[in-house]
Amino acid sequence: MESSMVVSQNDNAKGLYGWEAIEFIKQYFAQNLPSAELVFENADSGYWCIKYYYQGAYITLDSDRGSLHGSITIDNKEFPLWQFDRVVNSAMWSDDKSMLIVLKTVKRFFESKT
Protein backbone atom coordinates (compact mmCIF):
# COMPACT_ATOMS: atom_id res chain seq x y z
CA MET A 1 0.00 0.00 0.00
CA GLU A 2 1.23 3.48 -0.82
CA SER A 3 0.04 4.67 2.56
CA SER A 4 2.59 2.42 4.22
CA MET A 5 5.46 4.04 2.30
CA VAL A 6 7.33 6.27 4.68
CA VAL A 7 8.41 9.64 3.35
CA SER A 8 11.08 11.37 5.35
CA GLN A 9 10.26 14.64 7.07
CA ASN A 10 13.58 15.81 5.67
CA ASP A 11 13.47 16.68 1.95
CA ASN A 12 17.11 15.56 1.57
CA ALA A 13 17.85 17.79 -1.45
CA LYS A 14 21.13 15.96 -2.03
CA GLY A 15 19.29 12.70 -2.62
CA LEU A 16 19.49 9.27 -1.11
CA TYR A 17 22.60 7.15 -1.29
CA GLY A 18 22.46 4.66 -4.15
CA TRP A 19 21.68 1.63 -1.99
CA GLU A 20 18.99 3.61 -0.11
CA ALA A 21 17.33 4.63 -3.37
CA ILE A 22 17.43 1.05 -4.68
CA GLU A 23 15.86 -0.31 -1.49
CA PHE A 24 13.20 2.44 -1.47
CA ILE A 25 12.22 1.58 -5.06
CA LYS A 26 12.24 -2.16 -4.41
CA GLN A 27 9.94 -1.68 -1.42
CA TYR A 28 7.54 0.40 -3.51
CA PHE A 29 7.43 -2.17 -6.31
CA ALA A 30 6.96 -5.04 -3.85
CA GLN A 31 3.95 -3.26 -2.34
CA ASN A 32 2.40 -1.66 -5.43
CA LEU A 33 3.51 -3.58 -8.54
CA PRO A 34 4.43 -6.97 -7.05
CA SER A 35 4.37 -8.87 -10.34
CA ALA A 36 7.01 -6.57 -11.88
CA GLU A 37 10.28 -8.39 -12.46
CA LEU A 38 13.53 -6.81 -11.30
CA VAL A 39 15.96 -7.22 -14.20
CA PHE A 40 18.85 -4.93 -13.26
CA GLU A 41 20.18 -2.92 -10.33
CA ASN A 42 23.41 -1.08 -9.73
CA ALA A 43 24.56 1.37 -7.10
CA ASP A 44 28.06 2.68 -7.69
CA SER A 45 29.25 5.82 -5.94
CA GLY A 46 27.08 8.76 -7.07
CA TYR A 47 25.29 6.76 -9.76
CA TRP A 48 22.54 4.21 -9.36
CA CYS A 49 20.13 2.49 -11.73
CA ILE A 50 17.27 0.03 -11.38
CA LYS A 51 15.22 -1.58 -14.13
CA TYR A 52 12.00 -3.59 -13.99
CA TYR A 53 10.01 -5.48 -16.62
CA TYR A 54 6.23 -5.22 -16.28
CA GLN A 55 3.33 -5.80 -18.69
CA GLY A 56 5.58 -5.83 -21.76
CA ALA A 57 7.51 -2.68 -20.84
CA TYR A 58 10.80 -1.82 -19.14
CA ILE A 59 10.79 0.78 -16.38
CA THR A 60 14.16 2.43 -15.78
CA LEU A 61 14.94 4.76 -12.89
CA ASP A 62 18.41 6.18 -12.37
CA SER A 63 20.31 9.01 -10.79
CA ASP A 64 23.63 10.69 -11.42
CA ARG A 65 24.84 12.78 -8.50
CA GLY A 66 21.35 13.38 -7.14
CA SER A 67 19.36 14.15 -10.29
CA LEU A 68 16.50 11.71 -10.91
CA HIS A 69 15.58 10.25 -14.31
CA GLY A 70 12.84 7.85 -15.27
CA SER A 71 11.61 6.26 -18.46
CA ILE A 72 9.40 3.49 -19.80
CA THR A 73 10.54 1.52 -22.85
CA ILE A 74 7.86 -0.10 -25.01
CA ASP A 75 8.69 -1.94 -28.25
CA ASN A 76 12.29 -0.67 -28.04
CA LYS A 77 11.13 2.96 -27.90
CA GLU A 78 12.03 4.91 -24.77
CA PHE A 79 9.56 7.43 -23.33
CA PRO A 80 10.66 9.80 -20.56
CA LEU A 81 8.10 9.79 -17.74
CA TRP A 82 7.38 13.50 -18.16
CA GLN A 83 5.69 12.64 -21.48
CA PHE A 84 3.08 10.75 -19.49
CA ASP A 85 2.73 13.23 -16.62
CA ARG A 86 4.59 16.52 -16.35
CA VAL A 87 4.37 16.39 -12.56
CA VAL A 88 7.66 14.44 -12.68
CA ASN A 89 9.35 17.66 -13.79
CA SER A 90 8.97 18.80 -10.19
CA ALA A 91 10.67 15.60 -8.99
CA MET A 92 14.21 16.29 -10.11
CA TRP A 93 16.23 15.02 -7.14
CA SER A 94 16.71 11.47 -5.91
CA ASP A 95 15.23 12.17 -2.51
CA ASP A 96 12.44 9.98 -1.17
CA LYS A 97 9.75 12.63 -1.78
CA SER A 98 10.65 13.00 -5.48
CA MET A 99 11.04 9.28 -5.96
CA LEU A 100 7.57 8.69 -4.56
CA ILE A 101 6.16 11.17 -7.12
CA VAL A 102 7.94 9.31 -9.92
CA LEU A 103 6.92 5.87 -8.65
CA LYS A 104 3.27 6.90 -8.35
CA THR A 105 3.47 8.18 -11.94
CA VAL A 106 4.77 4.78 -13.08
CA LYS A 107 1.93 3.06 -11.25
CA ARG A 108 -0.68 5.39 -12.79
CA PHE A 109 0.77 4.74 -16.25
CA PHE A 110 0.17 1.01 -15.91
CA GLU A 111 -3.23 1.48 -14.29
CA SER A 112 -4.27 3.58 -17.31
CA LYS A 113 -3.32 0.72 -19.66
CA THR A 114 -5.87 -1.65 -18.11
Image: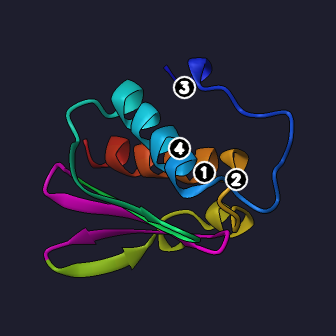
Q: Are marks 3 and 4 in contact (CB under 8 Å)?
A: yes
Three-letter code for the amino acid on which mark 3 is drawn: Glu
According to the picture, the residue beneath numbered tag 1 turns out to be: 99
Cα separation, mark 4 vs mark 2, equals 14 Å
Q: Earlier in the sequence, mark 4 or mark 2?
A: 2
Q: Which residues are magenta?
A: 53-75
Nearest to viewer (mark 4 / mark 2): 2
Sooner in the amino-acid sequence: mark 3 or mark 2: 3
On whether residue 26 falls in the magenta region, the answer is no
* Amino acid on which disc 1 is placed: Met
Residue type at mark 2: give it. Asp
Residue 59: in magenta span: yes
Q: Which mark is residue 9?
A: none
CA distance for labels 1 and 4? 8 Å
Q: Residue at x 43, y 51 (%)?
A: 106
Task: Please name the amino acid that badge 4 sits on.
Answer: Lys
Q: Are marks 2 and 1 in contact (CB under 8 Å)?
A: yes
Query: What distance separates the C-alpha of mark 3 from that of mark 4?
Result: 9 Å
Q: Residue at x 60, y 51 (%)?
A: 99
